[in-house]
Image: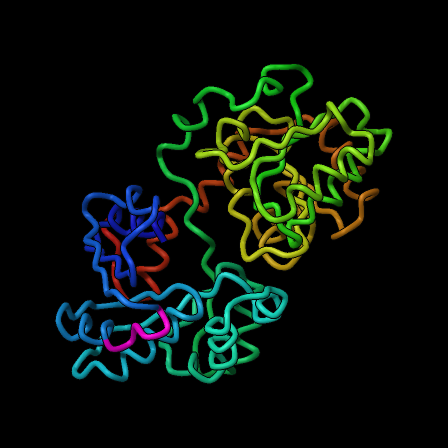
Amino acid sequence: MVNLAAGLVGCGARVEVVLVRAEGAMLALLPPEVRVVELGGRTAGAAPALARYLQTRRPQALVAFLEQANIAALAARRLARHWSGRLAITEHACFSQHRLRPRSWAHRLALALAPLAYRDADLLIGVSAGAAAEWRRRLGAQVPCLAIGNPVVDDAFPGRAAAPAPHPWFSDQPRPLLAVGRLSAEKDHATLLRALGDPRLASSRLVVVGDGPERQRLEGLAAGLGLDGRVAFTGALADPLPAMARAALLVNPSCYEGFGNVLVEALACGTPVVATDCPFGPREILAGGRWGTLVPVGDPTALATGIAAALAALPDRASLRRRAQDFHQRRIAGRYLGLLGFRPRPG
C-alpha cells in the first residue's frame, strides 16, 4: 500500500491513506505528499467512521486492502449518503489459501461474509491472475475481478542494493544462496534445507533472512542435517536488497504465495531466481520459467536439481532487471488509475 501510494503520487494523483490506527514503522515510508487520516477504534467497527470520511472528503475512488478492510469499506459505502465514487477491493491471496491460515475470529468472520459482501464492489483486484480467477469463480459475473501485480520496484533500488552487505559470506566466492521471508510453515524453508544436503550442492552455503515461529525448529533441522557452518540465520533485516544483489541465487521454496515480492526484488537486482511453482505468483512473475527456474512444491531433490542448474547457467542480469520494471510503482499505479477511470499524467 505504501508503494502504491508513492506510485500514484508519481502519476500526479492526490492520495490520502485512511487507517484505523496511524501507527507503525511503515508510516515513515509514505511520501510527504500523502495525507494520513486516522479513524480510530478497531477495523471490525470502522464502517461508520469511514462513512463519515467519505461524506466529508468525497474522494473520487476508494481502494480497500484485505478482507476486514474490504468489508468495512463496502459497509461504509452503504452508510455514506451521496457518495458516488468508485470502490475497489483488493485480495492478496485466494480463498483456499486463507483457509490454511489460523487467524482471529474477526478474520474468520470476514472470510465467511466475503463471498456475499464482495458482490457490492465495483471492482476486485487480485495481485495475481490465479487469485483473481478464483474470486471470479466465487463471485460470478457480478463483479469484475482483474489482476494487477504488486508495485515493488522504485527508482531508489540501485542505491539501496549498493549498501554494505549484511553478512561476511556475501564477500566470499562462491557467493551464498539466499532465502528471504517469514520463517513460517507456508514458506517451507525445511525443504530448502533438505535440498542443501544434496551432494550436488556440497559447496553451497545458504543465508536465511527473516524471522518467525519456525526459526528454532529450522535451526535444529539444519544442525540435524549436518549443515553447521553452511547455513546462517540473520533474522529480519531492515532492507534485504544488499543481500539480494550479492547472492548467487534467490531461492523461494514456498507452498503458496499471494504474489511473491521477493522474486521481483531479486530480479531488480539482477539476481537469478529459483522458486517453487506454487499458487499463484511465482509462475506469473517468472513467465512460466522464462525469467527464472520453477520446481515442484515440497520436493527437495527437484529443488536441488533446479538450484544446481541455475548455478551452472550464465544469467542475463540485464534482462532480469528489465523484467522487474514491469512491477515498477508508477507502472502499476497507472494500471490502478486506468481501472478506476482516471487518466495518468503523460510520461
Residue shown at 62% from the left, 50% from the top: 184
Tell me if 272 is positioned left or right of 302 in this view. Answer: left
Q: Residue furthest right?
A: 199
Q: Residue furthest left?
A: 56
- Judge by depth and name the residue closer to the eye, 132 or 35: 35
User: In the displayed structure, would residue 73 be above or below residue 317?
Assistant: below
User: In the displayed structure, would residue 332 be above or below residue 106?
Assistant: above
Residue shown at 46% from the left, 73% from the top: 106
Spot occupied by residue 122 in the image (x, y as percentages of width and height): 35, 76
Colour mapping used in the image: rainbow
Q: Where, quadrant-wise, is the C terminus in this rendering?
A: top left
Based on the picture, tell me whether residue 44 belongs to the magenta stretch: yes
User: In the displayed structure, would residue 3 be above or below residue 77?
Assistant: above
Spot occupied by residue 117 in the image (x, y as percentages of width and height): 42, 82
Q: Where, quadrant-wise, is the N terminus in this rendering?
A: bottom left
Tell me if 89 is positioned left or right of 266 in this view. Answer: left
Residue shown at 67% from the left, 41% from the top: 216
- Judge by depth and name the residue closer to the eye, 229 or 242: 229
Residue range (magenta): 43-48
Magenta stretch: helix, strand or loop mostly? helix
Spot occupied by residue 158 in the image (x, y as percentages of width and height): 41, 27
Residue shown at 22% from the left, 57% from the top: 16
Based on the picture, tell me whether residue 68 belongs to the magenta stretch: no
Give the number of callouts: 0
Spot occupied by residue 190 in the image (x, y as percentages of width and height): 73, 44
- Judge by depth and name the residue closer to the eye, 228 or 256: 228
